[in-house]
Amino acid sequence: MTVFILVAGAFTGPYVWRDTAARLTAEGAEVRTVALTGLGGRPAGPDEAVDLETHIADVLAVIDSAAVESGGDIVLVGHDYGIHPALGAADRRARSVARVVHLDSGMPQDGVPALAAVPDQRLREELAESGGGQAGELPPPARDAWPRWGSTTGLSEAALDGLTALAAPQPLGTLLQPLRLTGAVAAVPVTGVLCTGNGPGIELVQLMVDLGEPAIQALADPRVTFFELPTGHWPMLSCPAELAEVLTEAAAGRGHRLTAAGTAEPPPHLRPFLLDVPERPRERTGNTDLYLPEGPGPHPAVVFVHGGPVPAEARPTPRDWPTLTGYARYVAGHGAVAATLDHRLHAFTDYERAAEDVAAAVEQVRADPRVDADRIALWFFSGGGPLTADWLAAPPAWLRCLAANYPILAPLPSWGVADARFHPVRAVARAGKLPIVLVRAGREMAEIAATVEEFLTAAERCGADVEVIDVPEGRHGFETLGPTDEARDAVRRAVEAVLARLTA
């Protein structure tokens, strides 16, 4: 028999598991929910400091009880904040736990407090800078403030009402006290359940592994499996039956396994560009490369902006990736200067400094005497999409076109990006007559496709000038994922559309 031990997240208690637990029990499993002190468990005493260690002790008590009374395989499930006490307990009872399930949660590390995983960036900063110690409580969210803690996609009005009514204050010590791990938990198999309405799905996580992100390389271990649920951050309330099915599959060791970086040679982003493009003269200055057309100029210019986040240690750096060099050579072969650059988008919190890098590179390109400073196009890719917001909100007269391939056009809820500056869906209303060319992948990741559709809806509402070039069978990064006539044609049409607007 499988024994599921369920640990709820911030502000919530055992009640959130009611329907999922019933499903699991009906399928023959034993289910135990952990009542954390102050969050559905015993109330804290008047002088008691409730911290992460308090909650780890709560989970340990349930593990020890289950190990003695049932003898089944223990699958420990931590949702949201709940993964922190769950992981702390599993580290101390590694021989008793058969699997740890991270349910739409982060990857806690030794010495790092749960505060680091709070999605609300502004709240993280406020608590980190408060210097008020670990005493006190964080009030639960108001009904309309739950999205600051995770997407409410899929929740009914009644479920949201119940979540709000039963929420309890979160003891600050549980968020501020660092998690301490001995490393024993590394031997326990792991499953990640990704809620794609709240954050990245499996394909995007694989992309981050391919890019060499050091913090997530462990996710490609064969003992780690993954599932997706097309819902927001509270699947036990929005789709309890589907969650129960996934947990049952996880307990059996099933699920998707990632491919480790370096096992597929080369990784997708370093495979050849889909067009056979001749070499062009290239000049490198600082973080920016220029690809030059024939003739003295001045020529119009296209500045290509890569996506991300990209690990700072990644080699080659993005400006040498086949997609960017391929587009740059192709554009230069058609009479325009092409520029590629490396910017510092190494984490979701780096958009401000990445925007500074892009703006500086654009001015460097415009200052080159071989460039017509009044005819510039900017072309963004993937996670570089949020960087379009500055240019959409206040397009300069010299910006003749803005293009974007398979872009992320609104921050994903799990990013915790509080700055509304990098939100193209909101910015497009101020784009005026700026021509926009959007290349849309038909087999796009669901979480990214949703932001594109939201952007197009907003663009239609305000009458923005958007041309969509569809690649029906294209995937995210289709230029290096296998050449097809459809994809080649889309690249040619996109370049033609951008250059036409530069020379109009």
Image (cartoon, helix red, strand yellow):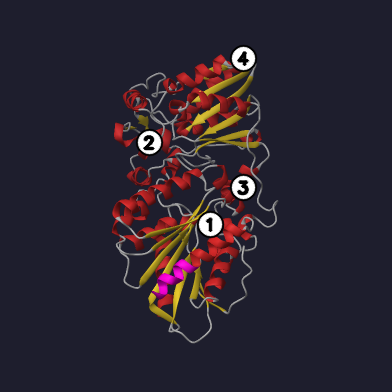
**Amino acid type, mark 1:** Val
The reply to whether callout 1 and callout 2 are in contact (CB within 8 Å) is no
User: Is any part of residue 420 visible from this angle?
Assistant: no
Horizontal arrangement in the rendering, residue 423 relative to residue 63 (left or right): left
Residue visible at 41% across and 73% down?
A: 502
Q: Nearer the viewer, residue 468 or 320?
A: 468
Magenta stretch mostly in which secondary structure?
helix
Q: Nearer the viewer, residue 463 or 359?
A: 463
Residue corresponding to mark 3: 217
Residue 250's image quarter?
top right
Residue corresponding to mark 1: 310
Residue range in magenta is 496-504
Q: Nearer the viewer, residue 42 or 355?
A: 355
In this view, the mark in front (2 or 4): 4
Q: Could you tell which of marks 2 and 3 lies nearer the N-terminus?
A: 2
Residue 143's image quarter?
top left
Horizontal arrangement in the rendering, residue 249 relative to residue 35 (left or right): right
Q: CA distance from mark 2 to mark 4?
A: 34 Å
Which label was assigned to residue 68? 4
**Amino acid type, mark 3:** Gln
Which label was assigned to residue 134? 2
**Amino acid type, mark 2:** Gln
Q: Position of residue 353 (x, y in %)?
A: 41, 61
**Amino acid type, mark 4:** Val
What element does badge 2 sit on? loop
